[in-house]
Image (cartoon, rainbow, N blue to C red):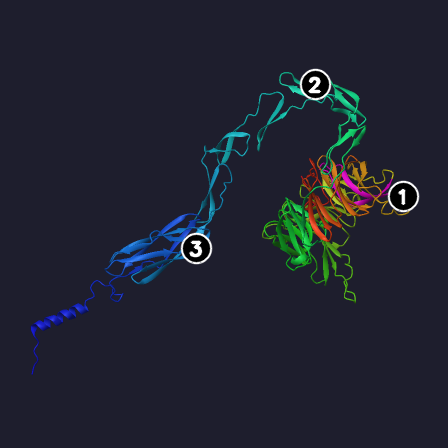
Amino acid sequence: MASRIHPGTSLLVALVLSVAGCRCGDDPGVGGARQGFRPQEEAVDFGRALEGSLTRRQVTLVATGRASVAVKASSDSPFTVDVAEVTVPGSGTIAVDVDFFAGNGAAEGTLTLTGAGRTETVRLTGLGVRPLNCVPSGPCFESSFDLATGTCVERALGDGATCIPTSRCQTNGRCESGACVGAQRSCDDDNPCTVDGCSPTLGCVTSPVACPVPKNPCKVGVCDRDDGCEEVDAQDFIPCGPVDCKQSNLCFRGSCQELPTPDGMVCAPATACQGEGTCQDGRCEKPDAGDLPVDFSQDLGGEPVGQPALLVQEGALFTSVCGGDAGCRLVSFTQGGLLRYESPYPDGGSRTLLAASDAGVVVLAPEGLESYAPRGPGARQWEASWESMGADADAGAWVGHVAAGQVALNSSGEVIAHVAWGGMPEVDPDGGVGPLPAPSRERWVWLSGRGEDAGSLVRAGPVEPWSGEARVVVDMEDTAFRFTGSQRLERADLSPDGGTEVSITSLGKDGGVAQGLASLAVAGGRLMVGAREFYVADGGSQQAVDWDAGTRALTPLAEPALLTAGGTPGYLFAQSCDRADGLPCTPEEQRTVLRAVDSETGQVSWEVDVLPFATEPGALHDAALIHGGAVGVLSDTERPDGRQVWLQLFAQGQKLMMCPLPGRPTVVAGASFFEDKLLVVLERDGVWKLESYGMGPGIQVEPRGWPQRHGTPGATRRESP
């Protein structure tokens, strides 16, 4: 029997099937969801941005259904979203603003989007660029940082643009073809009693007219604006001749008169450890001297190694120390005694200081020469092996030799060294090591001190048989001189085109001096050689030091040897013995003498004993030139209760100051004079210390010439301008 379907029933079934099969308005890729979203970008790159700047980018959100959807947005630093929640309209889009606050370097983050029960992420990247400090090369140029290339871009200002001339002697600057041109400044003050001039760095400068000095010591020349120079009476009671505590030649009403010296008149200036002396009953009486006041006393944390024990470079103090918990290391302090750094040596072995400059601290290492940074943590900058300096790698076991007096640093930071090498010491049957044998070969080398090739061999002389202890110095023109152990005085003439060739010129008669000690200093165009002769540095005349002058026999000391900026006088030290019976002096009879010598004649200008006491033995430690024509000397004496160390000041054969260091140091390892300070490395009660002392009012180390044992406090063995 055929079934029958009611027409109304068929219409209902068709309607149900039609609704069930319809997905009107749905995204075919989301399986029928009526509400949803997706980010249009998978990643956003903000590109390069200046450090500290804000860059904005947009992320587009696309609705995946007809219904609107609320989306929360968040991000990681340094990225931020402008609005924390947005609504994506149904079947539409909306932009989310994202900001990038640029730092210095690459940055990564994530934009997190949450809504309609799902989470989407977008990767965020950017690069913060720190701009260079762009300084124009001249007043008629401007320089700016180009973000795209990361470089400074310079352009010339147009002609007629205003500019500030580099010379303060010009005004109203205008640019012309890239140069700043100004009108000449007038410095005339319309005063006939002044000398007017202009300094490119200071501008207008004025100094008083120097009137002629009257023959009468009680008259002075003064300048009157209307009448010019004229003589007037000097101030009453100023010295006009010899003055002592009995009679004084003093000015009174324009004439010099001899008068009894009144009590209370100052007869000796105050020093760092003693008040001024005054005349009392015809004698100059001084208060008792106290100890030299200490600025700081800093523990080294170990024992200093080698000589020099202390180097000073631009106020930074350096010493090489072994012992304590840190092993062997380079230690640096500030001028005020604060620790700057401790830099352990790579292999834990000891190093000996050689020289220091702004290019680095050069030390002697077991495998050759090394340089350590003078700033920061003091990291090792370079090393130069003995093989790289000319030693034969196939010659068997050997050891290198170089000392502080054999290394000099020129103005470009190059290391000029007289290096030598020889066999290793023998090992005895008991396992001990024998004495170090003498070197067998030597060479003069130049090493680069800066840049990528630092430590590499720049130029060198020939490899020669070892001739004995040598000394190297550099003058202000960067000319290097060497006094060899075979008594040859040599000058290194470098190739003018910057090549590696070195020609060696012998100076003086017979290629050098006939005899001399390991001593060499240079200043004012003169060389003081072997503590026995003076040479003109360009190869001219030579003059022997007259060590036989005087009433006592003197034995010269190699160092200290000091030479003033003008090349004369030179200051040399010697040991003396007054015995006439031919027997050797006892320690109590042995004296140490400072002698000032005229470099043009070789004759003695003056001499003085430098040990603190005439009847007590002692030792000379170091010396330096003091501004104003004096010499500072550090020496000691053996007293019944122990060693006492003294700072003394000498000028024109007279002792001007004598101040003891406090306490009784056991050993003095080394010292350096710097500015107005005496710096000493010494041992007290088994503890090694670095100590600083002020030398007194008005006392400054002479910075010019050859002021200390190795030329400068940094032992650069370079003449100071």
* Residue pictured at 78% horizontal, 20% vertical: 257
Task: Kindly identify the residue that appears in the image at 46 percent across and 51 percent down.
Answer: 104
Q: Name the quadrant containing residue 115.
A: bottom left
Viewer-closest of 55 and 182: 55
Q: Is residue 714 above or below residue 549?
A: below
Choose the circle earlier in sequence order: 1 or 2: 2
Which quadrant is the N terminus positioned in?
bottom left
**What whole-number distance in Å separates the C-alpha atoms at marks 1 and 2?**
56 Å
**Residue on which the image places disc 2:** 231
Q: Are marks 2 and 3 in contact (CB under 8 Å)?
A: no
Q: Are marks 1 and 2 in contact (CB under 8 Å)?
A: no
Q: Disc 1 marks which residue?
A: 579
What crowding class fits label 2: few (fewer than 14 Cα within 10 Å), some (14-19), or many (20 or more)? some
Q: What secondary structure is marked by label 2?
A: strand
**Element type where label 3 sits in the image:** strand
Amino acid type of the residue that numbered disc 1 sits on in the rendered structure: Arg
What's the magenta region? Answer: 552-581
Residue 440 shows in this picture: yes
Left or right: where 659 falls relative to 17? right
> How far across and down, in percent of the image, does residue 411 sit?
64, 44
Left or right of 125 on screen, residue 248 = right
How packed mark 3 is, by other alpha carbons closer than 10 Å (few <14, some 14-19, many 20 or more), is some
* Nearest to the observer: residue 366 or residue 442: 366
The disc at residue 107 is 3
Neighbour tally class for label 1: few under 14, some 14-19, many 20 plus, Cα within 10 Å:
some
